[in-house]
Amino acid sequence: RSKTLIRRRSKMQIKRKRMMIRRRKMQIRRKRMMRDTDKKKQDADKKKKQDADKKKKDDDKKKKDADKKKKDTDKKKQDADKKKKQDADKKKKDDDKKKKDDKKKQDADKKKKQDADKKKKDDDKKKKDADKKKKDDEKKKKDADKKKKDTDKKKQDADKKKKQDAD
């Protein structure tokens, strides 16, 4: 073999080796790029998932807060309505009591007036009866006096007649 052949072969080998190295480097670079792309994609997916989870969590919290607020508002409204109803019932009760008391007072006043009228009537009747009795007594006395006078006159007349007869 000639030296040139050997040299050429070795040159070719060197070229081949270099090509192989270049190829390997390219492969590694490609792999790395693929890996980076995958990692980027994974990171993006992860971030997307985290963002979605955070948004869901926030939405849930908002909903919970809104529900709580609504519940509180409803409770406040219920309490207010209850108080209003109680106040109205109390007012009605008080009004009814006042009406009842007024009626009692009116009845009492009416009874008092009736009693007073009855007493006045009774007193008037008693006075009238007393006046009548007095009048009757006076009349009786007058009649008795008249009768006595008549009797005395008769007696006198009889005595006078007796005396005349005797004379």
Image (cartoon, grey):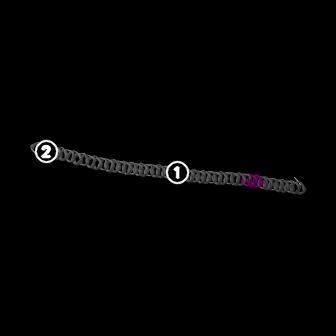
Dot in front, 2 or 1: 2
Q: Residues within 10 Å of mark 1 (few under 14, many from 20)?
A: few
Which numbered disc covers residue 164? 2
Relative depth, front residue between 119 and 75 = 119
Q: Is residue 55 magenta?
A: no
Furthest residue toward left:
166
The one of 162 and 20 positioned closer to us in this rendering: 162
Would you say 99 lies left or right of 30 here?
Answer: left
Q: Quadrant of the C terminus?
A: top left
* Amino acid of disc 2: Gln
Q: Which residues are magenta?
A: 31-40
Q: Residues within 10 Å of mark 2 (few under 14, many from 20)?
A: few
- Mark earlier in primary sequence (2, 1): 1
Q: Secondary structure at mark 2?
A: helix
Determine which quarter of the picture holds residue 166: top left
Q: Nearer the viewer, residue 18 or 115?
A: 115
Helix, strand or loop at mark 1: helix
Q: x%, y% of residue 45?
A: 71, 51
Q: Is residue 150 left or right of residue 42?
A: left
Task: Report the residue marked by disc 1.
Answer: 88
Residue 110 rendering spot, x and y as whole percentages: 42, 49
Counting from the top left corner in percent of width and height, residue 35 is at 73, 53
Residue 36 located within the stretch drawn in magenta: yes
CA distance for labels 2 and 1: 111 Å
Number of numbered markers: 2
72 is higher (above) or lower (below) than 147: below
Which numbered tag is attached to residue 163? none
Q: Position of residue 112 (x, y in %)?
A: 38, 51
- The part of the image, by quadrant, that contains residue 44 is bottom right
Amino acid of disc 1: Ala
Q: Nearer the viewer, residue 43 or 78?
A: 78
Left or right: residue 132 versus residue 113 is: left
